[in-house]
Image (cartoon, helix red, strand yellow):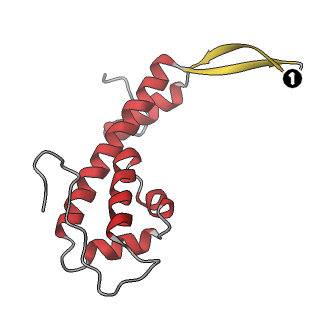
Amino acid sequence: MQDSADPLAFTPVPRVRSRRDGWSAERQQRFIELLAQIGLVAICARAVGMSAKSAYALRKRPGAEDFARAWDEAVGLGRFRAEREAIDRALHGERRPVFYKGRQIGERTVYNDKLLIAVLRAKHPKYAGGGFEGW
């Protein structure tokens, strides 16, 4: 059951049979933790050694309601974190090393306007066609 202090806490989906390569309680927990970091199901499933297809199947199993709730919370949190990071990088840039003759001689800040526009379009789909004039 959900711990009111932690929206990502959940009761693992009961396993029909115990398999070494299956969705153990530990694997389910790690999947939800990763999902809260980036919000991308396929990448998180692969990171725990499972497929996205099996993750969605697990979510649909009887007794998976709490897991599905934690999944939804984690995806929202992961997307928020990714958007925040993209906006921060777009506004403040990224430090990249500068090399000359194989040696690092300094750093430069690189800004990415396309990254900021992608985030804004994702947050405001009505501007997906490019028309930001209404802002």
In the displayed image of the protein, which residue is found farthest to the top? 106
Q: Judge whether residue 6 can be spotted in this image.
A: yes
The residue at the point 50 percent across, 67 percent down is 49
In the rendered image, residue 92, in percent from the top left (x then y), is placed at 48, 17
| Picture layout, residue 35 above or below residue 64 | above
In the rendered image, residue 52, in percent from the top left (x then y), is placed at 44, 68
Q: Amino acid at mark 1?
A: Gly
Q: Which residue is mark 1?
A: 102
Left or right: where 18 falls relative to 10: right
In the displayed image of the protein, which residue is found farthest to the right? 101
| Picture layout, residue 125 above or below residue 3 | above
The residue at the point 35 percent across, 52 percent down is 33
Between residues 85 and 6, which one lies in front from this camera angle? 6
How packed mark 1 is, by other alpha carbons closer than 10 Å (few <14, some 14-19, many 20 or more), is few
Left or right: where 59 falls relative to 99: left
For the C terminus, the image quarter is: top left
In the rendered image, residue 122, in percent from the top left (x then y), is placed at 37, 40
Q: Say which quarter of the image contains residue 129.
A: top left
